[in-house]
Amino acid sequence: MIATDVSVDQETAIEAMTMRRVAWRIVPFLMLCYFISFVDRVNAGFAALEMNRDLHLSPSVFGLGGGLFFIGYFILEVPSNLAMERFGARLWIARIMVSWGIVAAAMALIAGPYTFYLLRLLLGAAEAGFFPGVMLYITYWFPSAYRARIIGWFMVAVPVSAFLGSPLSAALLDADGLLGLRGWQWMFILEGAPAVLLGLLSLYLLDDRPGHAAWLAPAQRTWLTSRLEAEHDAATLVPPQTLWRVLANGRVLAMALVLAGSTANSSGIQLWSPQMFKAFGLTNMQTGLANAVPYAFASVIMIGWARRSDRLKERVWHSVLPLALVALGLAGCLWFRSLPGTMVVLTLAVTGIYACKGPVWAVATEWLAAGAAAAGLAQINALSNLAGFGTTYVVGIIVGATGSFSLAMVPLLVLAAASTVTMAALGRSRYAAPFSKSASVPKI
């Protein structure tokens, strides 16, 4: 009995040391990469404060160009994730980052509607596969009991990118005239360059699998590999299938709708909220600071909510309640049209958007078997981002036709409500628990 207890204690100690070391090695770097990717994806929202006037871009033109990002993203999402499985995560993540950094900096060359459309389409194509690739990469390194908090830490880079990137982008807009370039051109160049540098650095910092990690002790590599293989062999709700059957799987499609309530609304709000705040007569810097406030709250709550999901070993209601908060916040935009009121309701919506991400993506990774994960995760992310094209474009049309940002939030509200109902329905269906209710999860 004593020998058994010692063995259990030793395994617990190995688990704690292994997961702590893996988390510190991988997560901060991936957070930084995602931070830069989202800055490059949505900084057009701040560029619009000056660029739209310089190039005579109407709200509908800006909405269409903003949405075209998601078309390129959608087309190449699944092929990119399949390529990552073939060529390895380290090489493929580096390729994605270098290519998107080059295109993001090239946004400084926009000369009118058509170059705006082309470069936004190319930016989506270049970035395609990064997010689902990282989700797949997380399944290579983290057992299911850790994933909500790890995904939460990784994805906190999104609200942080808005919190820090908003005043930074606003400040860069004031760099007018330097070397004959406008401030919005400098913003694109200086915010695109870090992606190229980080892509090259990833070749040295990332390893494809735990078995390749020389920085783990042999006992740690053995424990982690065995634990992950045991989980991959367990029954899941989406087993290995042919590619097309995975892409058309009902649960995969339903999870895409659930994620759309977060992903598409996140992109829509980040692209349009700077103009919403600017409409109250704020300066560029005041707009940047006001836009940062909702994301400061979301960054804190997102981490705590994901940790709570892991601690209670519950996913569904930790997804449903934040999605309902998104709908409530967006509904508030119809009634609260002052600057303080807009700040409050957008804070509610943004907090819900990011609080749900850890639990929702944990559900997705737990449902997908190893053989279905690459295509399934890419399909979920691709479709949820494709919804971003529709919402962004429709918001632009409504703003152009009515001049009302409040009315333009209605499509986002409808999407959030549909996502909430879908997640609740999935929760009522057969749900396979990914780990024992009695299992302990060491802190990392």
Image: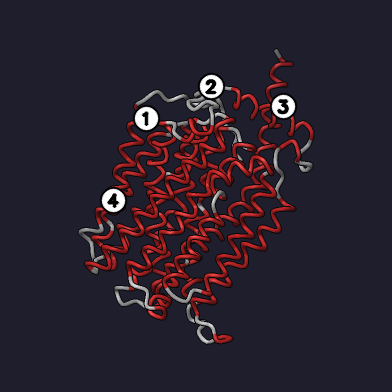
Indicate which disc, 4 or 2, sits on the residue closer to the N terminus.
2
Q: Which residue is mark 4?
A: 413
Amino acid identity at mark 2: Ala
Query: Mark 2 or mark 3: which is in front?
Result: 2
Amino acid identity at mark 1: Gly
Indicate which disc, 4 or 1, sits on the residue closer to the N terminus.
4
**Rendering quarter of residue 81:** top right
Residue neighbourhood size for the residue with mark 1, other residues' Cα within 10 Å, grouped as few (<14), some (14–19), many (≥20):
some
Residue 103 percent across, percent down from the top left: 57, 65
**Rendering quarter of residue 272:** bottom left
CA separation in Å, label 4 and label 2: 36 Å
Q: Which residue is mark 1?
A: 427
Indicate which disc, 3 or 1, sits on the residue closer to the N terminus.
3
Residue neighbourhood size for the residue with mark 4, other residues' Cα within 10 Å, grouped as few (<14), some (14–19), many (≥20):
many
CA separation in Å, label 2 and label 1: 18 Å
Q: Which residue is mark 3?
A: 10
The quadrant of the picture occupied by the C terminus is: top right
